[in-house]
Structures are given as structure tokens and as C-alpha cells.
Image (cartoon, grey):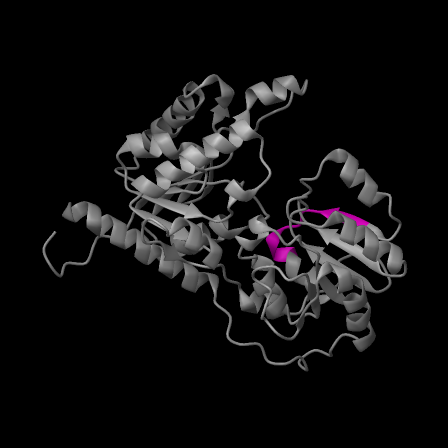
Amino acid sequence: MNAGTAPSPVTSLVVCSLEPWGTVRRRIRILVDELVALEPRMRVLYVVPAFDVPHEMRRGAARSRPGRRLEQVHPQVHVLRPRKWLPRSLGPGADRLLGRQLARTAEDLGLVAPLLWVNDAAYARFSVASGWPIIYDVTDDWLLAPLAPRRLERLKADDALLVARSDAVVVCSLDLARSRGRTRPVDLIPNGVDVDRFRRPYQRPADLPGGPIALYVGTLHEDRVDLELVHDLARARPELQIVLVGPDDLPAAKTARLAALPSVHLLGAKPYDEVPAYLQHADLVIVPHRVNPFTESLDPIKAYECLAAERPTVATPVAGFRGLGPPVVIAPRETFVAAVGSALAKGVPAAGTAPSAPALPTWRERAEAMDAVMARVREQRCAA
């Protein structure tokens, strides 16, 4: 490439994501949506978590339908759900089979020398072997989660390989920047929010119960949510309707225990476009997260959404919420229930009377930052 010549835009992109493609949009999906809007020539193969055939057979669910293997969901985007035929515990054969499905699909779609955006570290060895330029995007530090020893060792090896061999490493939080930036430069691209979407007025959702509402929006996962704190709040404030909106990744017994509480309402996952309505019609937003090394690695999208929706919020002192100021109140678990009571006693500010929030970063700005990293990686490869 001649000096001073701008790199050609990335027009072929393969995304190995830990997130499914659906109406519940998270960081990777939102950024992909923004990127294809920025670059009309970009074509994307979005690889979602594989359909685990051995696992489904062990569950006695051999008749369960995995859905379509490849689907075009947008003029520029195809979604691949590969089939996982072997457990990873049997060796590298399982990863090789997944990689072959990915490579064959990219070739069939005519994606020439694509850039590989890796969020699922299980694709580490395939990524390096492919010869494609690699961006490793770390959004959660699963090395700090309580995983089974064998799974943790595999993840450590995959993560180390990607950190060492990727053309760029992108992280979303300061904690991840420290941990992944010990041995190499990293790019910090935090999360964002669609401010207009969260401030536009919406009608009250039909499935919201009557009475004062404390709302939690997010995945129910025991590594993140302090379930005992939710129980404590339900017992201390029986008149308060605790509404939990989001995917349920809890063990069945813990879901059942929550559901047995008369004031707790598990509404399940909601489309991204419907989330603002739930926030707007809640009396209070609660974030009863555990405070541990894993949650310290996160950059919670819900923090940006609470600020955009201007809702009173009580959160434990977790990363992403500390230091935000009004309308967010920080309370350790020992005083969390009392803080909820105080926030409810103050009432909900009328529309337009909440303190003005600072300018919030948009998803378009974050996509532009990712696009710049992609262009840099492409330029480096072309110059090599």
C-alpha cells in the first residue's frame, strides 16, 4: 500500500459471537447492525453458538429441532448456527469440525479474505490457522467465573492464544484493559446507548403488574445477580412488585424459588425495542448485582440505559454504576433494601424534571470506533 493511501473498507466480515441473533440485542449484535449501516458494501457472516448435538442427546432431547443452519436475516447479513457433533473433552476434533463449517460457509457466500471478529474464544485455534486478520473482542472475563476446572483450562489456553496472536484486541471495560493489556496494546471500546429510543414515550406494557414496581433488566445469571438480595427485598417490602425482565440462565430450582415469591414477576426476555417501555413505567430500577472479580470486568449496558431513561436506580457498588451520580444511588448489599425504601419514598420525578444527564455515548460512535480498528488491522495486513 502506498504511503498516505487510505485502507479499503472491510467488506467481508465473519463474527464468532457468544450472543445469539434475535430480538434481544446485545453489544455484538448492535455493533454489527450499526456497522452494516455505516458500510453498505459490507457483507457479514454472523456465527452464533453451535447446536450441541451430544448435549441435546444426553438431555433426551434428540427430537428437538436445531433450527435452520444458515439464514439470511438482512440483505448484508447471514447467520450460521453450526452443529457441534463432538464434545470438546474428546480433543481438538470438535473445534476443527466447527471451524470447517465456518470456513466452508464463508467460501460458499463468496466472502474473500474476511476479517475475523472473535468474541467466542472457542474459535481460537481455527482463527490462527485461518490466516485471516483477527480482532479478539473481550466483553466478559469468563476466566474469573466459577467454571469447571477442565473448561477453565481450555478457556485460559484459548484466551492466551488469541491475546498473543490477534491483530488487535478490543475490550469494553477498564478492568479488561488492565488484564488483557499486560502484554500488548489493547483498544478500549465501551458500550453505548440509543438515547432517543430510551427517551421516546411508550405505552405501559400490558404484563406489568399494578402497584409500585422495582424493575431489573438483564440476564438472570447467578454469577451476576445476588439472588438472596432479591429474596431479602421481597420479604422486607411485600407491597413492592419486583419485576425481572431478561433471559433466565438460572438453574431450574433457583428459578422456581424466585417464582414462588408472590411479589416477584419473571417476565422473561423481551425484544430490545420493548425494553424502554418497561424502564419508563417502573417506579424504580434495581441492580442487585454481586460484587466480585467477574462483575468488576463488566461494562453493563443497563447503566447507560438507566441514564438515558432517567429512571431512579439503586445499584450495588459494581463496575459501570459506581460514580454515576443521580439518578443512580449506590448501596452495598447491607443497606440495599433500605436504599430502595428511601428511593421509593422520594417518588418518581415528573417527565422532564430529572437532572440533566451528561452526554451519553451512542452505539453509532462505538461502531465508528470499531470500524477504525478494523481499518487499521486491514492496513497493517496490507503493509505486511
In-image side of 183 versus 33 (left or right)? left
In-image side of 271 versus 368 (left or right)? right
Q: At which x and y percent is residue 96?
A: 39, 23
The residue that appears at 49% across and 23% down in the rendered structure is 88
Residue 266 on the magenta segment: yes
Up the image or down, 151 lies above or below 227; here it is above
The residue that appears at 63% across and 68% down in the rendered structure is 309
The residue that appears at 9% across and 55% down in the rendered structure is 2
Q: At which x and y percent is residue 223?
A: 64, 44
Q: At which x and y percent is residue 327?
A: 66, 73
Q: At which x and y percent is residue 310?
A: 65, 72
Question: Depth check: 107 or 186 in front?
Answer: 186
In-image side of 212 versus 40 (left or right)? right
**Start and end of the magenta stretch?**
265-274
In-image side of 374 versus 50 (left or right)? left
The residue that appears at 15% across and 45% down in the rendered structure is 384
Question: Depth check: 291 or 110 in front?
Answer: 291
Residue 105 visible in the displayed image: yes
